[in-house]
Image (cartoon, rainbow, N blue to C red):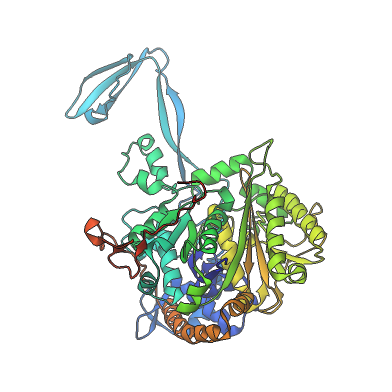
Amino acid sequence: MTHLPVITAMGGVSPAGRSAFHYGYRRLVIDRLTTDKARETLLNIAVLGGRIEYNGNHWQDHTEQPIELDPWLDQHKQGILDGTLIRQLETNIYDPANQRHHNRTRLSPVDGEDSLSFTLKKRHLPNQIPDNWQVTEGDGNNLHVTVNGPLDIMMEDSHSSPVNYAGQLPSGFDPAELYPSRNHPRGLQMTIYGISDALYAMGIDWDVIRQKVAPEQIGIYACSSMSQLDYNGNGGMLQARLLGKKVTSKQLPLGFADMPADFINAYVLGNVGSTGSSLGACATFHYNLAQAVRDIQNGTHRVVIVGGSEAPILPEIIEAFSTMGAIAGDDVLQALDGGTSPQYRNACRPFGNNIGFTLGESCQFFVLMDDALALELGATIYGSVNDVFVNADGFKKSIASPGVGNYLTFARAAAATRAVLGEDSLRQRTFIQAHGTGTPQNRVTESAILAEMAKHFGASHWKVSAIKSYMGHSLGVAGADQLASSLGIWQYGILPGILTTKALADDVHTEGLDILLDHEEVGVDAMDSILLNAKGFGGNNATAAIMSPAVTRRMLEKRHGKKALANWQNVNESTQAKAREYEQQTNQQAISPVYHFDNDVRGGADLSFEGNGLNLRGYGQKISLDLPNKYADMSE
């Protein structure tokens, strides 16, 4: 029997806001929500960004003055919305108008002179004194230096970045302020917030899971695709000496790409089960999801947390992508529209006349359980994962060019959907979240793949969207953004359209496709499945097949029976009640993330053997040592 991986919780934060309870999705379609839901969404974003909070007696803004909530929301609505999604870079990350760099230059003696001279503090004297230097004592701690001939130096300077836009977390939100961040890189600060959001929103205490599930049956798979590249991570490790500073003891270890998973293990859950990080450029989340799905399907794991955190909005990263021609400067963006200023909000235009992708930051985490455990614990069912397929491109002319791999992943995901749900469901009730980067190359190659797949599988109007048009490209977390934004469709029944693309480009393939350039209200039960597509740099391709909550419940009832579903529903009422308590809190004030530093550290004294099992303090189930011989037909 293959166990079904059920999605039981999600959390995190993206440029659209918090993922839990579909707030990020709701920001995308806020103009189609009911008045109450739209207002609640605005409130959640405002609280997240520290604009307002409820102190137990009254609402107050950042001045700590009492306010009336409804008039305040009316007054600040546009400002709240403007502080989300893709927009002009905000200086809380870095100042794009004042980017430091060094210029190589040569100082030469003035005409008629053979040397130049200057004073230097003794502590700044180079370890290796150049041969053409003459050093003599000066006043106090100063030295007098005479240089015979020219002197090559690096002169500090600054420049303005040609790219001034990105998909940034909501204005005012700073995860470092919510816990003792101790100079953690931004991606790890986001990790602590995101996983805490998912755990709280699950509505089931982690200790309950730890008593029900053996330690080796829990897994954590999460990472970033480009590691932690700000100054507190690898960026500082590489820059420090060139900036005249020292490398710290934390920069290298905290810079590893697998640190999101490591932080969850060490400082949030105390997990001793399996852990890992599979990197695959833009398909990184899909790779980790594939590992989680295999573990649950095979029965080796009962609970797996999968996700990632990426904080790549840094001047060096933007400059590198810009040099590659992947990100366009403000001048090119402005020229695209022929206006007097660049339209930052519309920078990413999948399948339209476009100029490049837009960088974004995000952290997203999901809790998967096997079907039996989800029912037993009364977990909320957001959907389930049918399967995830990964294929490389084969031989390539350029490492950045597309190949055949995405044809394979999408065809296999579509075939898996057909196998479980049938031809009609695949053709009529399947929605596609395209990779949709907003580059001229992607709009042609990906639309060609989707059109070819539609032709083969007999689809006449596959509905297609691309959420990067709202949030930008968060690299290794892009697939998680797709999933978080898609699950809301089954709660609110609205397919988010590509609002930044006003018309499809002439070279886009449309046969068998319905590429949505506006929101479409289809109802909560219109779609049985969603295909999440990823076309990653370097030939990292993946497609995930996700099934709806309604389909998932029907499958669970068929396997476990109506009585089991009825029991699940009864238990789930308390799960949802607890989750709603947390939701109400997030609509009033900032949450305190789960963060356990130097807490309940275990050692050998916390282990004990019992028969063919190993007990670990704090867990209700033994680690089994009664392992089968997988090679019985080959061994003696």
Measured as percent of width and height from the top left, residue 182 is found at 31, 55
> In terms of depth relative to the viewer, which is nearer, 536 or 436?
536
Task: Locate the N terminus and report the quarter of the image it occupies.
Answer: bottom right
Asked which quadrant contains residue 197, the reply is bottom left
Asked which quadrant contains residue 33, the reply is bottom right
Asked which quadrant contains residue 388, the reply is bottom right
Asked whether residue 246 is in view, the answer is yes
Left or right position of 612 against 401? left
User: Please, is residue 149 above or below residue 228 in the view?
Assistant: above
User: Please, is residue 536 above or below residue 122 in the view?
Assistant: below
Measured as percent of width and height from the top left, residue 133 is found at 31, 16
Asked whether residue 174 is in view, the answer is no
Left or right position of 340 against 200? right
> In terms of depth relative to the viewer, which is nearer, 550 or 249?
550
> In terms of depth relative to the viewer, which is nearer, 167 or 426?
426
Measured as percent of width and height from the top left, residue 455 is found at 82, 59
Q: Residue at x 37, y 57 (%)?
A: 263
